[in-house]
Amino acid sequence: MENIKLKVTYLVLIAVVIFFAVNLIASKSLNKYEFDMTQESVFTLSEGSKKVLSGIDEPLKVTFFFSNKASDGIPVLKSYGTRIRALLEQYADNSDGMIKLQVIDPEPFSEKEDKAVSYGIKGIDIDQMGTKVYLGLAITNSIDDVKTIPFISPDKEKFLEYELTRAIYDLANPSRKTVGILSTIKMGSGPMLGIPGLGGSSWFVLQQISQMFETKEIDVNATKIPSDINVLMVVQPRMLNEETLYAIDQYVLGGGHAVFFVDPNKEGGGTGNPNDRGFTREINKLLNKWGVNVSPNRVIGDRMAARKYDKGADSENKWKYMDNVTWLELKGDNISRDDVTTVSLKTINMNTAGAIEPSEEGANTTVNPLIRTNKTTMKIPVFKVRNSPDVNEMLRGFVSESKEYNLAVRIRGDVQTAFPNKSGENHLSSSVEPINVVVVSDTDILRNENWSKTQEVQGYTVVSQFADNAAFVLNLMDNMTGSSELMNLRSKGDTKRPFVKVDELERKAQENYLNKENELKDRLARTEDRLAALKEQAERQAGSKIALKAEQQREITRFSDEMIRIRKELRNVQGELRKDIEDLGGTLKFINIWLMPILVVIFAFIIFYRKTKYSHSRMEVK
């Protein structure tokens, strides 16, 4: 028996040594073997990125500027930089030697810091001595084209893979992409579009598109969309003939990317005829096949998102500025944080936009909201927003439907043609790959007035932005002109995992706390009413003031005792919350620190016991 105890003691010691040895070896020499156990594969390259990397035909150099030493006192930045480096190493490993990774620690006041600055890498100050921390990168190709990310912000980590893959893709494919624009309205001043270069248009967003991309005007009666168009931008489709609709249908089915701006009530540009401001329902023949529908007869009002309307000087009205429920300022939860085109946007302004709703045909597509309303919404007939609309009347008659509506969506999936009776050698009856289409139910989002102000400074026109409309449109063009691999590149999950159980405990405690607080307020109100009634009774019966004061005092004493009791209950609720969280923390610590060594020891003991029993059985047989 003594011998067995000694063996067990040795076994426990060996198990502990093995446990620490395995951890030490794993940290030092097994780090190249990685297993991504996160829910959304945060640390694994997407298939889209791998396809882009496999298509690189010239060497690219990625220089990662990371202030490793200077960030020692900033754990969040330190760990983030380490994750970025690990991701970049995956890019290099999956590129067949086409990506050369260089990691530089730009120490303060060194030549390496000068090199970072020369690439446009931005540093952030961490002390009053001018010490900066750098976390950016530069990618160069064989002809010295450069793509930089000046500072890789931790709050954009979710989309870091997309930004990296997009930069690599652009450098590997340096020719400018082409945006085809098909518009049935006059967009700003000058010719319809002011082609070439959109220079004749006064809409700044179109000028910026022409600076970033090649632009080509598509005739409104086109029977074929040119094959060299990387993305088709359709603005306010009115009375398009069947051949043009068929051309758009075949372009999208053939893998072409498209962005539609479809507005029930366009407020800028056009013919001047107030009844000629909307789109016509022919375009819904395509949209319905793709899973959505936009009504040409209704606009959306949103009480919570309403912008102020300048009524001008009017002595008969108290307010000079009134809320226009159809002029929307969309921000916060109105803007998707799950799509790369909208993740960084803060404010989008729209005027008399339509509702994008599911079509009755029920297409096999995924419709992801990019911009949506609050729940304080109401559908308003389009005739009420034309011909000098009465903003006050719309406000007085507003009745919320308590429903959110989509104002911009991305559509993906396999679809069928909207023209099944068509035929021909090149006719496509279904999409050759999942379509990628964006629909925006407003054209006024493009107008200068909704997102910018201009002023003349020393002979130059300076544009200042108060909304992100242009950024949204340019993001769409940039995103949609990429390859199909980029289009399907999923955004990464967030590495900051929430404490779901703790949050749930806090919510329950807060609910209990608020219920108790409301109970206290109700009792306080009832007591105040009782005291008021006593005071009124005292004024009627002046002779019984002493008795009434005593009764008032009893009410006050009773309420004070009740208030103390309820406050004690509130403290108990908070104490129970802390206890629940502490118990949960203790359980997690036990699992993380002690459970695994204990399991190792138990497993080793079981093996030892079975081997000992087997040895004894063999000895008995002999």
Image (tube, grey):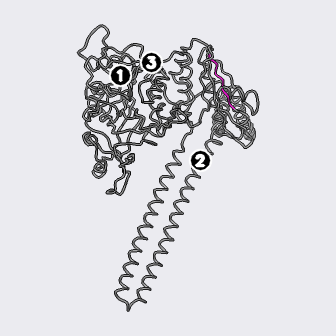
The stretch of residues the image draws in magenta is 60-66
Q: Which mark is residue 182?
A: 1
Q: Quadrant of residue 358?
A: top left
Q: Quadrant of residue 603?
A: top right
Q: Is residue 120 left or right of residue 575?
A: right
Residue type at mark 3: give it: Thr
Residue type at mark 1: give it: Leu
Q: Give x and y (percent) for residue 71.
A: 70, 37
Residue 179 colored in magenta in the image: no
342 versus 322 height, above or below: above
Question: Which residue is rendered at x = 35% and y = 84% of the image?
Answer: 537
Question: Which residue is rendered at x = 35% and y = 17% of the image?
Answer: 251
Q: Quadrant of residue 23?
A: top right
**Which residue is more in the foreground, 301 or 358?**
301
Question: Which residue is rendered at x = 54% and y = 63% of the image?
Answer: 571
Q: In this figure, which residue is indicated by the disc labeled 2? A: 587
Q: Which mark is residue 16?
A: none
- Residue sitting at the far front: 459
Q: Give x and y (percent) for residue 182.
A: 35, 22
Q: Is residue 367 left or right of residue 337?
A: left
Q: Callout 3: few (<14), some (14-19), or many (20+) C-alpha neighbours within 10 Å?
A: many
Q: In this figure, which residue is indicated by the disc labeled 3? A: 178
Whether residue 622 is visible, yes or no, is no
Q: Quadrant where the C terminus lies?
A: top right
